[in-house]
Amino acid sequence: MKLDDIKKLHQKKYRTELGFFLVEGEHLILELEKAAKNNPLLASATVYVSDSYGDVQTDFELVRISDKQMQKISDTKSPQGIVAVVPFSPAASAQKVNVERTIYLHEIQDPGNLGTILRTLAWFGGFKCVLSPNSVDPYNPKVVRASMGAIFHVPIEVDVPLSTMKTRFDSFACLDIAGAALSEPQFSNHHCFIFGNEARGVPREQLAALPVESFSIQGSGILESLNLATAVNMCAYELNR
């Protein structure tokens, strides 16, 4: 791929058009190598390394470029000197993961939140992440970095309207301050868990159209809400406790 095209991958429009996204930094590329062992499509990624980076041992196709060229394609102000161009893969490369539960995120906007959520889901395992339309792009470089490589290990679906989920699940769970305690046994009986936008939550009319049961994370009452990623983390922990 030409360097000019690689630079375009900083934008969602071109990631979608070209079918690739960027992974930057040694740690993320090591995670990519782990995932590629179970996914031939990921194994076709190409790694670009700057002249000053040093020796690299990798099974990926390796391309040497100058430090100036690395600065051009890097998404960070201080490039680490190693970038991979990775093809999109069904379910974010996690085809062999045994998925038991689905986390549905409605119009989530913060890249850091999504990356942290993916990291939590990968830690516990057995989760899929489904994103509604108008959600942050999971292949946004900020999401990829925040996921610390989890994006390669969690199945992801994008642009899935909430209304279509009722054909896939018989019941749903969501968080509501007036809901039952998260520790109640019936919380783990569900297989799809709905979380809303950081500021607006999930529209009431959309929830009302689903067979959904509400649960609450008990707190002191001093604050009205938890950070979205924190709430998902606590729910994932409870489901695996």
Image (tube, rainbow, N blue to C red):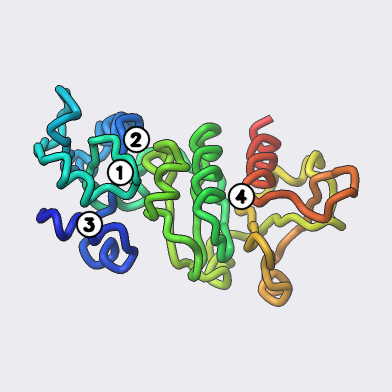
Tell me if label 4 and label 3 are in contact, CB under 8 Å: no
Residue 79 at what x, y percent from top left? 29, 40
Question: Sequence order check: which comes first, mark 1 or mark 2?
Answer: 1
As drawn, 180 above or below 26: below
Residue labelled with disc 2: 28
Amino acid at dot 4:
His
The label shown at residue 7 is 3
- Identity of the residue drawn at 26% across and 58% down: 9
Question: Sequence order check: which comes first, mark 4 or mark 3?
Answer: 3
Question: Sequence order check: which comes first, mark 2 or mark 4?
Answer: 2
Question: Sequence order check: which comes first, mark 3 or mark 1?
Answer: 3
**Residue 1 visible to the viewer:** yes
> Which element carries disc 1, helix, strand or loop?
strand
Amino acid at dot 3:
Lys
Indicate which label's residue lies in the foreground, 3 or 1.
Answer: 3
Q: Is residue 166 left or right of residue 54?
A: right
What is the CA distance from the residue labelled 2 to the residue labelled 4? 30 Å
Residue labelled with disc 1: 23
> Which element carries disc 2, helix, strand or loop?
helix
Q: Residues within 10 Å of mark 4 (few under 14, many from 20)?
A: some
Q: Is residue 59 left or right of residue 239?
A: left
Residue labelled with disc 4: 191
Tell me if label 1 and label 2 are in contact, CB under 8 Å: yes
Tell me if label 3 and label 1 are in contact, CB under 8 Å: no
Amino acid at dot 1:
Val
